[in-house]
């Protein structure tokens, strides 16, 4: 019979860390050359800040530099980068998958003793012979408790924020990244067409959302057969549920005369793209049509303004004038667009590249941004609902390429079903 004391002894003897090279490395989203270029950019940041190492803990940071996208479930994950190596530190519950699906080395920590994760961070530096006195961390996505634990783990070391510098690096996309983003836009269009074909009286929002999601997931699996299939979703809203951009699908059934909002989000290996469109089930009333056309006017002008050399806040200011001329500026709900890349509704965004009045970033070739004006008119008022269009543009040397092909406006999206 195994006693409690013997069990405790056996558990205490289990390893704190493991090497789990189970299987072989899988094909990653990008080439080895791409990851080396990204890591070289991070090491330039390290050199400029006199850092001995960087400990990345965010979804977006780890994904960008290693291709590994973790599932936390209350556990910590990291990518430790030194001048010579990059090492993911991952939980034993994931076994060999993180090593198979990431660029660089991997250390697995177990649950058998408290703070094994932090012990793994120490081991990553020890293996590279680094005694760190200055360590980079991501303060934009690092909980205060975890930051204090890292500081305690490396007693005497100074922790330095690298999140803003890393964000600026991510804002300029490589040719390989842009190719993935273009596929995402194409797949979003396919989801939109599946949704448009499914719209009819009596169908529920969530049923429409499932149809769009399924169409996109199948195409993602076909296009990226070597990567995980995860995280793709649809927000399909009708009537009053269109008032917010991030309202999840409900059981509400579509009715003739409804304003509709189609929002497709294909996630291609952690890379977010989006298609968002206003539609109506049946002919809109006069005020709804007027509001829709105003928003389309803003959208069209916004597409023209996105070009190299344009300043984010200047784009926002000019578009505001159109809303002001119609007395609708108070109905605007958020900024006019944002950057694309490694982001999702639950992790990360490049806040330094948003088309808002408080952002002075200058658009450069290699940046990818959306144009997505939105108006919300409150329930009970003429034309009530949320009006939103959304296209993705790749900024080039002489202009910008619109990679969204799904039609917008009343001429395309009044559904007679």
Image (tube, rainbow, N blue to C red):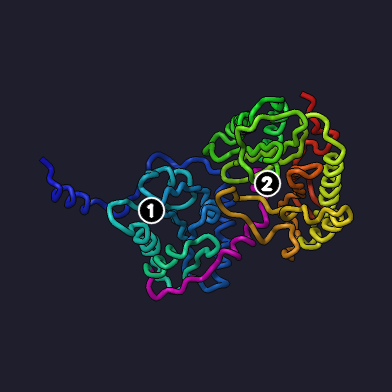
Answer with the quarter of the image where residue 416 lies. Answer: top right
Determine the residue positioned at 82% across, 40% down: 288
> What residue is shown at x 13% (from left), y 43% (from top)?
2
Q: Quarter of the image for the N terminus: give it.
A: top left
Q: Could you say where residue 417 lies in the image, as x and y percent from the top left?
A: 76, 23
Callout 1: few (<14), some (14-19), or many (20+) C-alpha neighbours within 10 Å? many
> Is residue 56 toward the left or the right of residue 299 in the image?
left
Single out the residue that lies furthest toward the left. 1
Towards the viewer: 237 or 166: 237
For mark 1, what is the residue? 107
Secondary element type, mark 1: strand
Q: From the viewer's perspective, is 331 left or right of 162?
A: right
Where is residue 372? Give x, y as percent.
Answer: 75, 48
Say if mark 2 contacts mark 1, CB within 8 Å: no
Q: Is residue 398 visible?
A: no
- Farthest-out residue, bottom: 156
Q: CA distance from mark 2 to mark 1?
A: 40 Å
Instruction: Give the extent of the magenta segment.
Output: 154-181
Between disc 2 and disc 1, the foreground one is 2
Residue 92 image point, x, y percent? 35, 47
Residue 166 is one of the magenta-drawn residues: yes
Residue at image location 78% in from the left, 33% down from the top: 280
Give the residue pinned by disc 2: 245
Can residue 50 be spotted in the picture?
A: yes
295 drawn magenta: no
Q: Position of residue 74 (x, y in %)?
A: 41, 51
* Above or below for 300 versus 208: below
Q: In the rendered structure, which disc, 2 or 1, sits on the residue that comes first in sequence?
A: 1
Q: Is residue 406 left or right of residue 157?
A: right
């Amino acid at each position: 019979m195994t006693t409690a004391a013997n069990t405790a002894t056996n558990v205490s003897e289990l390893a704190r860390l493991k090497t789990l090279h189970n299987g072989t490395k899988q094909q990653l989203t990008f080439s080895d050359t791409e990851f080396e270029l990204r890591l070289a950019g991070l090491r330039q940041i390290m050199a400029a800040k006199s850092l001995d190492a960087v400990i990345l803990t965010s979804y977006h940071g780890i994904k960008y530099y290693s291709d590994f996208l973790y599932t936390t479930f209350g556990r910590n994950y990291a990518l430790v980068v030194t001048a010579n190596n990059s090492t993911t530190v991952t939980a034993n519950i994931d076994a060999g998958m993180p090593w198979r699906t990431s660029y660089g080395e991997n250390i697995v920590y177990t649950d058998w003793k408290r703070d094994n994760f932090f012990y793994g961070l120490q081991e990553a530096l020890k293996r590279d012979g680094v005694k760190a006195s200055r360590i980079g961390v991501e303060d934009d996505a690092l909980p205060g408790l975890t930051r204090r634990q890292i500081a305690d783990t490396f007693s005497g070391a100074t922790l330095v924020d690298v999140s803003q510098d890393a964000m600026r690096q991510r804002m300029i996309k490589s040719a390989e990244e842009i190719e993935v983003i273009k596929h995402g836009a194409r797949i979003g269009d396919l989801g939109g067409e599946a949704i448009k074909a499914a719209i009819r009286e009596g169908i529920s929002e969530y049923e429409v959302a499932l149809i769009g999601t399924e169409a996109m997931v199948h195409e993602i699996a076909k296009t990226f057969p070597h990567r995980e299939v995860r995280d793709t979703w649809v927000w399909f809203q009708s009537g009053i549920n269109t008032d917010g951009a991030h309202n999840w699908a409900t059981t509400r059934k579509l009715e003739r005369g409804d304003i509709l909002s189609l929002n497709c989000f294909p996630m291609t290996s952690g890379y977010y793209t989006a298609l968002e469109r206003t539609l109506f089930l049946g002919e809109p009333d006069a005020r709804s049509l007027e509001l829709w056309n105003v928003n389309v006017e803003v959208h069209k002008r916004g597409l023209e303004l996105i070009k190299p050399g344009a300043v984010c806040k200047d784009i926002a200011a000019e578009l505001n004038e159109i809303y002001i001329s119609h007395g609708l500026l108070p109905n605007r709900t958020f900024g006019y667009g944002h950057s694309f890349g490694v982001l999702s509704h639950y992790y990360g965004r490049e806040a330094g590249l948003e088309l808002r009045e408080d952002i002075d970033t200058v658009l450069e070739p290699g940046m990818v941004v959306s144009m997505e004006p939105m108006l919300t008119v409150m329930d009970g008022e003429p034309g009530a609902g949320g009006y939103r269009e959304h296209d993705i543009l790749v900024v080039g040397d002489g202009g910008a390429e619109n990679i969204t092909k799904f039609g917008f406006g009343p001429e395309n999206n009044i559904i007679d079903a």
